[in-house]
Image (tube, rainbow, N blue to C red):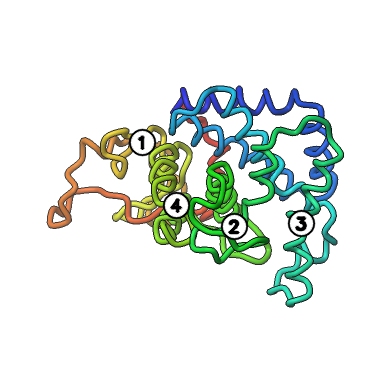
Amino acid sequence: MDCIESVATSMVDSVLRNPAALSCLMRMQQKDEYLYQHSLASTVWAAILGRQIGLARSDINLLSLGAMLLDVGKTQVPMEILTKPSPLSEKEQALMRRHVQFGLDILDKARDVDPKVLEMVAHHHERYNGAGYPEGISGNSIPVFGRIAGIVDAYDAMITSRPYARLLSSYDALRQLRKLADVEFQAEIVDQFTKAVGAFPTGTLIELNTGDVGIVTRQNQIRRLRPEIMVIMGADRQLLDDFRVIDLNEETATKEDRQSLWIERGLPPGAYGIDPTEFYID
């Protein structure tokens, strides 16, 4: 995971050195904090996935740049639509969907934007079964970078707090992507993304079968449901005085054994008032 994080960080740095990308990023930050954070996070997820599937460094750079710019067109969408907590009307939905063309128009004014980046912006809302927009194309008719963009964009949206949608844990978001494999998203890319991110990424909040709450401190590359965790809260929802580290791979996983431990469920960031970033994780 440390290696993946290092690669992802270098990709973000590379994107930020691109003047056009930086200008668009600042535009998104001025428009809306969620839009800004979503763009940065999507860049990292794209870099991680690109590394997982063995793309060349130059293609990972392009993939990261495209991921950052997916929603730049939303800077042209009114804030009352972007932040509306209730379902959009048909008219509002039609305007929201125009953010794809708005983004392409913005990038058309920039110099030397790679065609693969434009493909990502143009197709990140197309779906494998043809149910997406703006063209409603399906399967391999969607450029591969566009198929990747759709997965990255959808995953980060699911794990990020928004006024109009329920926040999911990383584990539940990956489960949702699995349900949509070969429906909305290409199954092979979903598989690779799941392997790259891991069922319980480092820093994920989890709840054990005992009711105790912990934070994943290290992934298990072989048994991905049995990571190392740091237990920080008891079943009574009180922070422990002494945190303890447990390697679930060394624990019995048989449900008939009352002493065994397993992860009951993943928790979304902020569950029980816990901010995982406040805890040092090596």
Query: Can residue 53 be seen here?
Result: yes
List the residue tagged with mark 4.
Answer: 186
Q: CA distance from mark 1 to mark 2?
A: 45 Å
* Residues at marks 4 and 2, CA–CA distance in whole angstroms: 11 Å
At label 4, which amino acid type do we have? Gln
Is tag 3's residue or tag 2's residue first in the polypeptide sequence?
3
Ranked by sequence position, the earlier of labels 3 and 1 is 3
Residue 140 point in image, percent of width and height: 49, 51
Other-residue count near label 4 (Cα within 10 Å), few / some / many at <14 / 14–19 / ≥20: many
Earlier-in-chain disc, 4 versus 1: 4
Give the Cα distance between marks 3 and 1: 47 Å
Relative vertical location of residue 83 with respect to residue 66 in this rendering, above or below: below
Query: Foreground mark, 3 or 1?
Result: 3
**Residue 16 point in image, percent of width and height:** 73, 27
Q: Nearer the viewer, residue 226 or 18?
A: 18
**Horizontal arrangement in the rendering, residue 93 relative to residue 109 (left or right):** left
Indicate which disc, 4 or 3, sits on the residue closer to the N terminus: 3
Q: Amino acid at mark 1?
A: Arg
Mark 4 vs mark 1: give the one in front: 4
Q: Residue at x 61, y 42 (%)?
A: 42
Percent of width and height locating residue 100: 73, 54
Question: Is residue 269 something that shows in the picture?
Answer: no
Q: Which residue is mark 3?
A: 99
- Mark 1 lies on residue: 244
Residue drawn 49% across the image and 36% down it:
49
Residue 26 place in picture, x, y as percent: 82, 38
**Residue 126: numbered disc:** 2
User: Which comes sooner in the sequence, label 1 or label 2?
Assistant: 2
Disc 2, SS: loop
Task: Give SS at disc 1.
Answer: strand
Q: Earlier in the sequence, mark 4 or mark 2?
A: 2
Which residue type carries mark 3?
Answer: His
